[in-house]
Image (cartoon, grey):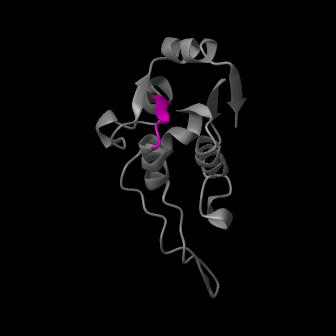
Amino acid sequence: MKALQIVEAAYRGTIEEQDDTILWLSHAMKGVGADLTVALRGNAVNYAVKGQAAGGLTFGNWHQTQPPDIEQDLTSLMEKGIQVYVVEVDLRHRGIPTDKLVTGVGLLSFDDFVDLIEDSDRIWHW
């Protein structure tokens, strides 16, 4: 079964859990043999921008000592054999140039995105 994880809601739970829940879930599922692809769209295309840092966050006396590292999370997914894509139109709408993307992240035209959906057995939209 080939499953497509479409991640559209960005930074959900990344302060409390230090990871995006769905990226973490994708790691775990791949670890037990799932055939996954990740497509970032909407605000989640921001995940694919290299060099982001979330350190230095404080609330009163509380300091975030383990900030999320989404770039490393994506890189690790790709190292496990999970292809990660961004939907080009969503990237363009946010003014993000393609040379700022994490190495290995693929680009999808909207038509390619539709084809990816059609070629997947299961679609999980987050």
Q: Is the residue 17 above or below the residue 106 in the image?
A: below
Residue situated furthest bottom in the rendering: 61
Q: Where is residue 62 in the image (x, y as percent from the top left)?
A: 63, 83
For the C terminus, the image quarter is top right
Instruction: Please indicate, yes or no, whether residue 40 appears anywhere in the rendered image.
Output: no
Q: Which residue is drawn at 47% across and 31% down?
A: 85
The image quadrant of residue 57 is: bottom right
| Residues rendered magenta in the picture | 80-86
Q: Position of residue 66 (x, y in %)?
A: 54, 72
Q: Residue at x 68, y 57 (%)?
A: 13
Residue situated furthest left in the rendering: 99
For the N terminus, the image quarter is top right
The image quadrant of residue 30 is: top right
Q: Where is residue 31 in the image (x, y as percent from the top left)?
A: 59, 46
Q: Is the residue 58 above or below the residue 119 in the image?
A: below
Q: Position of residue 5 (x, y in %)?
A: 63, 33
The image quadrant of residue 100 is: top left
Q: Is the residue 23 above or below the residue 81 in the image?
A: below
Considering depth in this image, is 22 or 35 the residue closer to the camera?
35
Residue situated furthest front in the rendering: 33
Instruction: Please indicate, yes or no, whether residue 126 appears anywhere in the rendered image.
Output: yes
Q: Residue at x 58, y 14 (%)?
A: 114
Residue 83 in magenta stretch: yes
Q: Report the label total.
A: 0
